[in-house]
Image: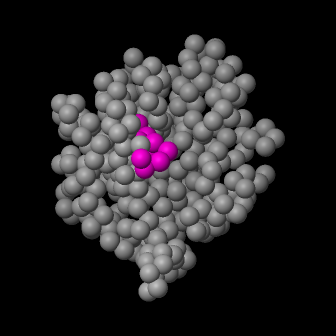
């Protein structure tokens, strides 16, 4: 297996370009997450992406500790949940306790919107200009760097306009923006703005979900030409554009294959990059778009260039 590429964050920290996404599809999946991480560590994974909201930080941390691999050789990403925006320090300390791995390499704001309990005891999602705003949350995250227990901080699911609005308020520029990104949703507008400020991009769901990408004719043709899997084509396509990927698999063979990044020719890159131009193919492949909203904010409020059904207008 070829060495796993590494990228530099804007604070000088190195991050493996391929990691393991630890969201199991539901919060009851923690035991499976532990077993998956054990397999991944044996396969050579050294980058693990989890979140407080996944409710498996304890299991991910346990797998890492039990591996015997030196902590300095592991990169751990976790995230501040929406209900934690008003208590960033407390949420960070809870994640650190759950992971029990000395420190966190990268802490992300999972979503720009908060979720708070109103005076009537009912949870609600504040509008972008209502406290706690993502700018206020970011300022609290910046303070955590003083503890020495978190090395880098970043955001997730931020559209290009939100990045532009956040930057003037930053003492520390985000080191990473984690977004849905794959050949059906290349997110060039967001990637271009991130590049402008030296912010790396991590692609979650880099293989999409279901057969849309894995069954795509172009991707399968390129896979055959390179003698690799369709998943390797999608992951290599992203990494070749300096995008970090965090695919998930519980299958031992697929875990190993996903680590093996290959080089696509310029012509192959162009073919894969053109998939989203096909009719009906420029779209999100996730299922959390409900009537044009995601967790209480519209696509416009998130800064996403996306129609209400998750498709991208031409």
The answer to whether residue 296 is seen in the rendering is yes
What kind of secondary structure does the magenta stretch mostly adopt? Answer: loop
As drawn, the residue found furthest toward the right would be: 279
Q: Residue at x 48, y 78 (%)?
A: 122
Rendering coords of residue 103 (x, y %): 22, 50
Q: Magenta stretch: residue 156 in it?
A: no
Range of residues picked out in magenta = 20-28
The answer to which of 178 and 88 lies nearer the viewer is 88
Q: Magenta stretch: residue 26 in it?
A: yes
Task: Describe the colour scheme in one phrase.
Answer: one colour
Rendering coords of residue 306 (x, y %): 69, 57
Rendering coords of residue 77 (x, y %): 35, 48
Give the side of residue 141 with respect to residue 132, left or right.
Answer: left
Give the side of residue 313 with respect to residue 242, left or right.
Answer: right
The answer to whether residue 77 is seen in the rendering is no
Residue 46 sits in quarter:
top left
Q: Residue at x 49, y 45 (%)?
A: 25
The answer to which of 77 and 121 lies nearer the viewer is 121
Q: Where 220 sits versus 244, above or below?
A: above
| Number of numbered labels in the structure image | 0
Q: Where 264 sits versus 29, above or below?
A: above
Rendering coords of residue 214 (x, y %): 63, 29
Q: Where 189 sits versus 264, above or below?
A: below
The answer to which of 93 and 103 lies nearer the viewer is 93
Give the side of residue 13 with respect to residue 156, left or right.
Answer: left
Q: Which residue is drawn at 79% across and 38% down?
A: 278
Residue 40 sits in quarter:
top left
Q: Which residue is drawn at 59% across and 15% down?
A: 226
The answer to which of 210 and 272 lies nearer the viewer is 210
As drawn, the residue found furthest toward the bottom would be: 119
């Amino acid at each position: 297996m070829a060495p796993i590429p590494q990228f530099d964050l804007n604070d000088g920290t190195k991050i493996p370009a391929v990691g393991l996404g630890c969201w199991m599809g539901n919060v009851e999946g923690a035991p499976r997450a532990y077993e998956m991480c054990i397999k991944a560590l044996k396969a050579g994974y050294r980058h693990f992406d989890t979140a407080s909201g996944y409710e498996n930080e304890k299991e991910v941390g346990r797998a890492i500790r039990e591996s015997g691999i030196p902590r300095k050789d592991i990169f751990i990403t976790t995230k501040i949940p929406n209900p934690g925006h008003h208590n960033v320090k407390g949420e960070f300390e809870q994640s650190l306790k759950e992971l029990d791995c000395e420190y966190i390499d990268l802490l992300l704001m999972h979503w720009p919107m908060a979720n708070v309990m109103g005076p009537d005891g009912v949870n609600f999602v504040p509008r972008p200009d209502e406290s706690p705003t993502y700018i206020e949350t970011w300022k609290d995250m910046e303070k955590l760097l003083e503890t020495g227990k978190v090395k880098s901080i970043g955001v997730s699911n931020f559209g290009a306009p939100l990045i532009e609005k956040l930057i003037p308020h930053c003492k520390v520029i985000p080191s990473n923006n984690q977004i849905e990104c794959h050949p059906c949703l290349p997110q060039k507008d967001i990637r271009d703005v991130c590049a402008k400020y030296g912010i790396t991009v991590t692609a979650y769901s880099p293989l999409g979900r279901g057969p849309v990408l894995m069954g795509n004719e172009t991707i399968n043709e390129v896979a055959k030409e390179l003698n690799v899997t369709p998943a390797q084509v999608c992951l290599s396509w992203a990494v070749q554009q300096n995008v970090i990927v965090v695919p998930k698999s519980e299958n031992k063979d697929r875990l190993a294959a996903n680590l093996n990044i290959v080089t696509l020719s310029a012509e192959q890159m162009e073919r894969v990059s053109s998939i989203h131009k096909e009719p009906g193919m420029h779209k999100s492949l996730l299922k959390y778009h409900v009537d044009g909203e995601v967790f209480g904010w519209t696509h416009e409020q998130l800064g996403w260039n996306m129609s209400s059904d998750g498709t991208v207008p031409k």
